[in-house]
Image (cartoon, grey):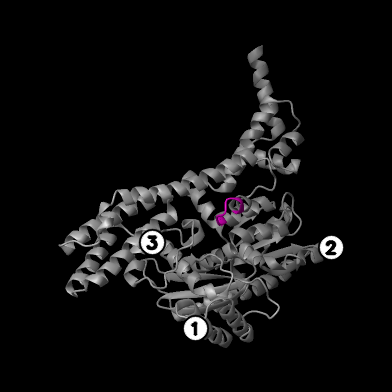
Amino acid sequence: MYTIVIADDEAELRQALVRRIDWEEVGFQVVGEAENGVEALELVEKLEPDLLLTDVRMPFMSGIELARAVREIRPNIQIAFLSGFDDFTYAQQAIQYNIISYLLKPISSKELTKELKKIKKKIDDKFEEFTRKNAEQEQQNLAAFFTPLLLDSFSDGQGKEREQVLVQEAIRKGFIKPESTYMCYTVLVTSFRDGDGNNCTVEDAVNAVNMILRKYMRYVSFYTDGRIVSLLAGTKASHEKYLHIIVEDISQSVKRIMNLTSSIGVSRMVPGLGRCHEAYLEAMDAFGYARRSDMGVSFISDIERTATFDQETVQAAVNEIESLLRSGTEDELRTYLGQLFEQLEQEDTPAMNIQLVMVQLIAAVFRVVYAVADSEAVQNLQKSSPFLGQLFFENPREMEERYMAFCLTAREVAAEHRKKSNSAICDRALAIMESRFADPELSLNSISTEISVSPNYLSTLIKRSTGNTFIDLLTRKRMETAKEMLLGTSMKIREISEKCGYNDQHYFSYCFKKYEGISPNACRRKFESKLSDLLE
């Protein structure tokens, strides 16, 4: 049974739709009704329906504006338009917003029932395709080319010549077009887990990820070692426009259709195919954060302020320690280091090899700390660890104890600075909202762009820090300011609405009444009446 929210400002029509359609027969359950686009957006965010059936022309927010907003927060939701003949062409402009059907008014119950069954069939097909186990032949051919490019560090050439060879091969295989210029590339690493936290990612699940990717950008995906690795290709503008929507679409679709949770690591954009291995390593680092946290999606640019240095010669032990320093527990770090030093001791590793390992292990610690902290913190860490000038000890266990203490101190430093960084990001965003709430164009996306983090990450930080969504906080600020102006000044309602970020006075009045329970004029009259009573 799929869920549906119905939005139409004509109350009689909306209620008639709810009453006259046998929703169970057509496979839907009505979970919410809205009389305007603003209410509909709130219901979509709260109820997460499978389908939104909305009128095109509504007060405060049109159906097309609603579709654009829904696409930002719930990209996997399907949308159907109720459209009059006069605005049908206008409505077709919104095809990019997951519009699954256009229904022309007036429409009878019989006609609507027939159309809803068609819509259900389309959603059924989407669910079936999402879990289909076959892979496209084109994708298999591309994967054969890109898998070693992403996973392997070795290459026969470097620089511009190698990049030209890679681009020509990508064009020959149809991955990018000959006229494509200034392409950027991003790597996603994705896994699925069940309710017990077990990894249940299988090779057949590549099709589910590809089904979403193909809606937005050029892509190639392949399965390796319990993970799905995807390479996205597009312009810088297309990455900025679609990337956060893509990861939300994957996460939401996996949850709704497969009843699983997903962990997704996202690299930075890189300007050439020759740097895809670097992007893959960044995506794996981000994936480590996502897997060990409850955020589900991690952009490496949100967590580490600088790109990591070349890891092509870094051993597996170094990678594991870096991962544990970023997001592992103290017990996990202690256990792993104990096993590592025990292995070095048992295998009678030559002194020169141990020295090389120790140099790498120490460099890894500083690299992780420097990625999230400032240079002063790194210097303090160095001063607090005098053993750094002496890599060898008579007793290998003494070496282990000193390095263990060094790692635990570094882990605390990194965690503390990451916490401060997150707090600073949140504080900065809230400060922007406090100072510019009167700007009608102010949004979570505009602020996230200004402070250079993804909207997903900023939204999570704000919710964790305040317990409220960005929209809730912005609305509260605007309404509280409006109330102060109503009660403390003689400004007109229109002037107050404009100073509080609303271009439409009627929309402002609607929001104020919803927030305060009474209209702006009634609120002012009530205050003046009480004030008059006190003065008498």
Earlier sequence position, callout 2 versus callout 3: 2
Residue 322: image x %, image y %?
36, 63
Q: Position of residue 55 (x, y in %)?
A: 73, 59
SS for tag 1?
A: loop
Q: Which mark is residue 86?
A: 2
Depth order, front residue of 83/387: 387
For the residues labelled 2 and 1, say whether their Cβ atoms are less than 8 Å apart: no
Q: Secondary structure at mark 2?
A: helix
Q: Look at mark 1 in the image and give the residue it sits on.
A: 156
Counting other residues with Cα less than 10 Å from the Cα at mark 2, is it few (<14), some (14-19), or many (20 or more)?
Answer: few
Cα separation, mark 2 vs mark 3, equals 53 Å
Residue 450 on the magenta segment = yes
Residue at 41% across, 76% down: 226
The structure residue drawn at horizontal position 58% and vertical position 52%, both measured from the top left corner, is 448
Q: Which residues are magenta?
A: 449-455
Disc 2 to disc 1, C-alpha distance: 62 Å
- First along the sequence among labels 1 and 3: 1
Determine whether the residue tagged by mark 3 lies in a helix, strand or loop: helix
The image quadrant of residue 340 is bottom left
For label 1, the crowd category at 10 Å Cα-Cα, with few meaning under 14, some 14 to 19 and many 20 or more, is: few
Which residue is tagged 3?
A: 292
Q: Is residue 394 visible?
A: yes
Image-based side of 197 in relation to 101, left or right:
left
Task: Give 231 or 372, whichever is nearer the viewer.
Answer: 372
Image depth: mark 1 or mark 3 in front:
1
Disc on the earlier residue, 2 or 1 = 2
Q: In this view of the protein, which residue sits in the foreground, 74 or 416?
A: 416
367 part of magenta stretch: no
Marker disc for residue 194: none
Q: What's the amino acid at mark 1? A: Asp
